Amino acid sequence: MARRDVEPGQKYRQPGGSALWVVVDLTQDAEGMPHARLVRGDDATVVKMIAVSALKDTKLYKIEE
């Protein structure tokens, strides 16, 4: 089964983790690899950039429906 595309507004959680992460926008790094900028759901001042391929890896992140 193919994973859906990563889009702004989607929410992710690491398996076993409590923090909810929300996709704010998508960008590409200097080599053209797609990345997502995420903010923590309970504290929007906490930001991280994750490769889209990592978000699609169900061992690393689970999408919250």
Image: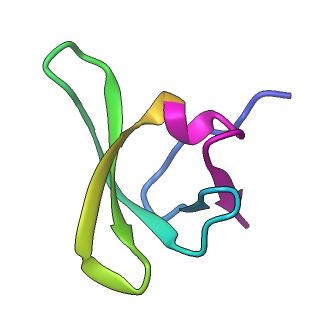
In x, y percent, where is residue 11?
55, 65
Relative to 39, say whether 15 is above or below: above
Q: Which residue sits at x=24%, y=16%? A: 32
Closer to us: 17 or 21: 17
Closer to us: 59 or 38: 59
In the image: residue 50, left or right of residue 49? right
In the image: residue 1, left or right of residue 16? right
In x, y percent, where is residue 19?
52, 73
Q: Which residue sits at x=64%, y=34%? A: 57
Q: Residue furthest front?
A: 16
Residue 42, by quadrant, is bottom left
In x, y percent, where is residue 40?
38, 73
Q: Give the position of the C terminus as an image quadrant.
A: bottom right
Q: Give the position of the N terminus as an image quadrant.
A: top right
In x, y percent, where is residue 35?
33, 36
Residue 60, by quadrant, is top right
Q: Residue furthest left?
A: 30
Q: How is the image coloured?
A: rainbow
Q: Is residue 9 magenta?
A: no
Q: Is residue 61 magenta?
A: yes
Provide the residue span drawn in magenta.
Answer: 54-65
In the image: residue 37, left or right of residue 31? right
Relative to 56, say whether 12 is above or below: below
Relative to 39, say whether 29 is above or below: above
